Image: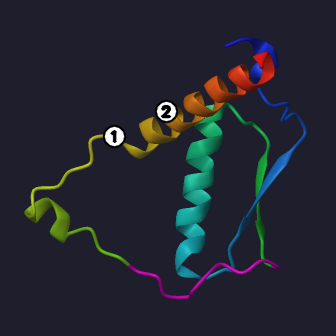
Amino acid sequence: MTADTRLDLAGRRICVAGHKGMVGSTITRRLAGEGCEVVGFAGGIERDTSKPDGTPRKLMSGEKLPAMGWAPRIGLRDGIARAYRSFLEARVKELAG
């Protein structure tokens, strides 16, 4: 990758939906934080309470999956890194196009 394939995110911020107390707000913020670390984004993450956070109760338990023989092969952080790397590779091809 060359430096010019990276997105210029200097001075930017990321807004995530999430009303205080909603089930997904903590998970969404954590996921956004992981993504920021992987791509090297040092800007701020803000909660935008004017946006909906989805259904108040969207719960799922993964406790039964291991009992059925399933286990993740890729961790969350590695998955984000792979997706970002794929995005950058596609961007290089697009710019070269």
Whether residue 68 is situated above or below residue 34 in the rendered picture: below
Q: Secondary structure at mark 1?
A: loop
Which quadrant of the view contains residue 9?
A: top right
Q: Which residues are magenta?
A: 50-59
Q: In the picture provided, is 93 more to the left or to the right than 51?
A: left
Give the residue drawn at x 58%, y 63%.
Answer: 28
Which quadrant of the view contains residue 91?
A: top right
Q: Secondary structure at mark 2?
A: helix
User: Which residue is more in the foreground, 82 or 43?
Assistant: 82
Q: In the picture provided, is 62 more to the left or to the right than 90?
A: left
The amino acid on which the numbered mark 1 sits, given as a three-letter code, is Ile
Q: Main secondary structure of the magenta part?
A: loop
Q: In the picture provided, is 86 more to the left or to the right than 17?
A: left
Check if residue 55 falls in the magenta segment. Answer: yes
Which quadrant of the view contains residue 55?
A: bottom right
The amino acid on which the numbered mark 2 sits, given as a three-letter code, is Arg
Q: Which residue is mark 1?
A: 74
Give the residue drawn at x 72%, y 36%.
Answer: 41
Q: Which residue is mark 2?
A: 82
Across and down, in percent, residue 13 comes to 83, 49
Give the residue drawn at x 36%, y 42%.
Answer: 75
Q: Residues within 10 Å of mark 2 (few under 14, many from 20)?
A: some
Disc nearer the start of the sequence (2/1): 1
Whether residue 91 is situated above or below residue 33 in the rendered picture: above
Check if residue 71 falls in the magenta segment. Answer: no
Q: Are marks 2 and 1 in contact (CB under 8 Å)?
A: yes
